[in-house]
């Protein structure tokens, strides 16, 4: 699968983040056999990361980020507050909604869909 990334570090990092969340051999094989690999490079691995996000509400949170201008700095807590205000975060009876926002933010980081500057 690394060869399919075309030795592009960002694509390899993205693939690693995606595979980290997969726990079974069947899940890994599903990624390996995905039709997305017919296109090469970073875009295929980013598409796999997006398609394999665990919650549809998380996809909405990521989609919101598309309105943020490129190379802008956004503070994590502010972004989570925006997601909360827009109703994108699903409440879990066992966790605070802010905790859900932190979890979503971290999943997007691990999947290389957001970039941490520190």
Image (tube, rainbow, N blue to C red):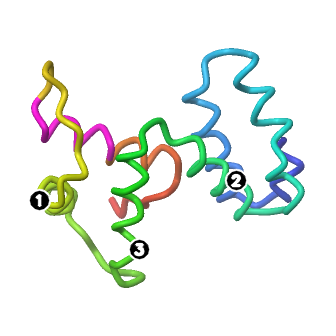
Where is residue 98 shown, x and y percent of the image?
13, 41
**Do residues under tags 1 and 3 come within 8 Å of each other at their CB atoms?**
no
Q: Which of marks 1 and 3 is nearer the N terminus?
A: 3
**Do residues under tags 2 and 3 come within 8 Å of each other at their CB atoms?**
no
Where is residue 90 shown, x and y percent of the image?
23, 39
Q: Which residue is drawn at 28% across and 74% down?
A: 73
Name the main secondary structure of what is drawn in magenta.
Answer: helix
Magenta stretch in the rendered image: 96-104
Is 88 in front, or is 113? 88
| Tag 2 residue | 45
Where is residue 61 shown, x and y percent of the image?
34, 56
Q: Residues within 10 Å of mark 3 (few under 14, many from 20)?
A: few
Give the foreground label among 2 and 3: 3
| Tag 1 residue | 85
Q: Left of 108 or right of it: where is 103?
A: left
Give the foreground label among 1 and 3: 1
Q: Residue at x 40, y 59 (%)?
A: 62
Q: Left of 89 or right of it: where is 43?
A: right
The N terminus lies in quadrant: top right
Is 4 in front, or is 92? 92
Q: Which of marks 2 and 3 is nearer the N terminus?
A: 2
Q: Residue at x 52, y 47 (%)?
A: 111
Where is residue 116 shown, x and y percent of the image?
37, 58
């Amino acid at each position: 699968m690394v060869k399919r990334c075309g030795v592009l570090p960002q694509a390899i990092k993205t693939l690693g983040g995606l595979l980290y969340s997969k726990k079974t051999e069947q899940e890994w094989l599903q990624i390996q056999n995905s039709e997305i690999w017919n296109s090469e490079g970073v875009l295929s691995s980013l598409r796999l990361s997006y398609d394999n996000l665990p919650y549809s509400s998380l996809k909405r949170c990521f989609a919101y980020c598309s309105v943020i201008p490129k190379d802008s700095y956004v503070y994590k807590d502010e972004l989570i507050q925006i997601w909360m205000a827009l109703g994108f975060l699903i409440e879990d009876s066992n966790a605070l909604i802010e905790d859900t926002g932190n979890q979503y933010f971290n999943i997007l980081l691990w999947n290389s869909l957001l970039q941490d500057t520190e």
